[in-house]
Amino acid sequence: MGSVWFKQVDKALIESVNQNIYYLDSEDNQISLPCFVRLPDTEIKVESFPCATLYPFLVKADPQRMLERSKVVVSKDIENGIAQVEKRIKAYNLFYQIDFWAKYYEDIQLITMLWANLYSKFNTLSVIDTDDNNRICHMIEFPNSGEVMDTVRQDNERILRRTFSYMIKVEVDENISEEVKIVTNREVVNTISQNIITSDGDSLEVIKLVWIFDPTIFNPSYSYIWDDTEPWFDSRVWKE
């Protein structure tokens, strides 16, 4: 799976505006709304109206969507005791401000009506990732989005501006893999049995298996994973 970052989201948002948002010319023909990305910390320069601008202003890691395992096994060669593992996918939230600009009240009303009809508070955005896969990103609208603001240019011309802000959930998959050894020879050297009383008053026998691994294949310079076939085995190892 490929990655989704600012470049991929920029392209998806611009295409969404171009394909779905329009204004009417003097003969009531539908004209596709131009859209472009404006750089942060630079003066907004809009040459023609109406139009839309994108402003990606923040990125934050999203630890709640991170996978628990730091690495994911993608293939195993049990016979040779080797596996290929990849680093986990990293989750981020990208923050965007989308501005719609127009000289006339009728234009800004039509544009924002079309946009509101396209995207509600909780949305999905279709994106093409770095491996050309179709991806769906969740897009959450900020409160107070859609407010109309007046901007007065240096020539004293008043421009209408309506702003929407979103948090867009993306993932970065670096596809970095490495070869690791597999521990395939395990031996139970001891078991510990203990009865415990649950909160419901039931008696439950707990058995802890104490494992050792074959020291002939152990090498501290390698990473190791367990070739687990038992679903209850949680990779915790006790050595005695």
Image: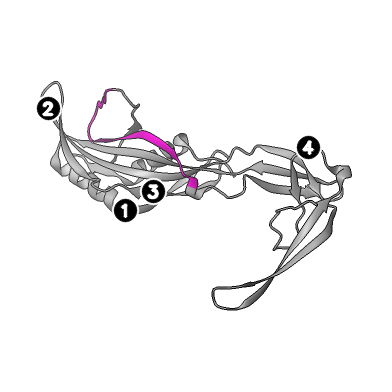
**Left or right: residue 80 compared with residue 206:** right
- Residues 104 and 83: in front is 83
Q: CA distance from mark 3 to mark 1?
A: 8 Å
Q: CA distance from mark 2 to mark 1?
A: 32 Å
Q: Give me the disc on residue 157.
A: 2
Mark 4 or 3 closer to N-term?
Answer: 3
Quadrant assignment for the N terminus:
top right
- Report the span colored magenta: 43-63
Residue 97 horizontal/vertical position (percent): 31, 38
Find disc 4 in the rendering and name its residue.
220
Mark 2 or 3: the one toward you: 3
Mark 4 or 1 closer to N-term?
Answer: 1
Mark 2 or 3 closer to N-term?
Answer: 3
Classify 20 as above or below 229. Answer: above
Is disc 1 placed on a helix, strand or loop? loop
Find disc 3 in the rendering and name its residue.
139
